[in-house]
Amino acid sequence: MNQNRPPASVVVRAAAAALFVAALGALLLAGTGTADLSAADRLHLELRDSDPKADSTIVEAPSEVRLFFSEPPQMHGTSVRLVTEDEELVETTDAVADEEDPRQVFITPGEDVTLEDGTYTVMWRVIAQDGHAQRGEFVFHLVRD
């Protein structure tokens, strides 16, 4: 028996404790723990809302598509695209931050663009101030009466 080695039960308990701490940390980071994660939630930029709203049905063509983020994105890495149900890219302006609230980013359809009835996908990509890229997409439906 090696005198320099701790007993097996000590090694097993230490490994179990390390696994427990790692699992608890993973649960807290995933948002499934019971701790208040409001500070952690603010660490990453996220889409909070949009106009038109995701999965909504609207009866008038929007004059703009506006995204509401949890923090101002870096505009040099921001893009917002509007795509038809036929996967055609709609001509729009480049994404612009709202002057009064830079957490809001919007695009407007091109001057000669008429949005037809149908389903549109808004595809967005932003870079947070900390350098993390975020992307997502949602749809809205245009159905005139």
Image (spheres, helix red, strand yellow):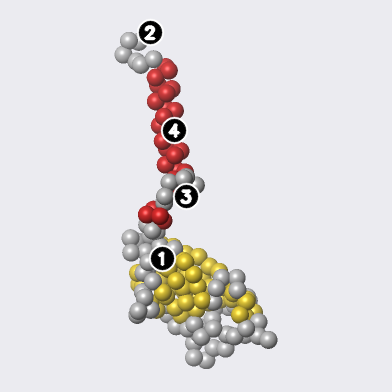
Amino acid type, residue under disc 3 in the picture = Gly
Furthest toward the bottom, the residue is 112
85 or 140, which is in the foreground? 140
Tell me which label, 2 or 4, sits earlier in the chain: 2
The answer to whether the residue labelled 3 contacts the one labelled 1, judged by CB atoms less than 8 Å apart, is no
The residue wearing badge 3 is: 31
Residue 29 percent coordinates (x, y):
43, 47
Amino acid type, residue under disc 2 in the picture = Met
How packed mark 3 is, by other alpha carbons closer than 10 Å (few <14, some 14-19, many 20 or more), is some
Amino acid type, residue under disc 1 in the picture = Ser
Residue 87 can be seen, yes or no: no
Quadrant location of the C terminus in the rendered image: bottom right
SS of the residue at dot 2? loop
In the rendering, which numbered label is found on residue 101? none
Amino acid type, residue under disc 4 in the picture = Leu
The residue wearing badge 1 is: 70
The residue wearing badge 4 is: 19
SS of the residue at dot 3? loop
In the rendering, which numbered label is found on residue 1? 2
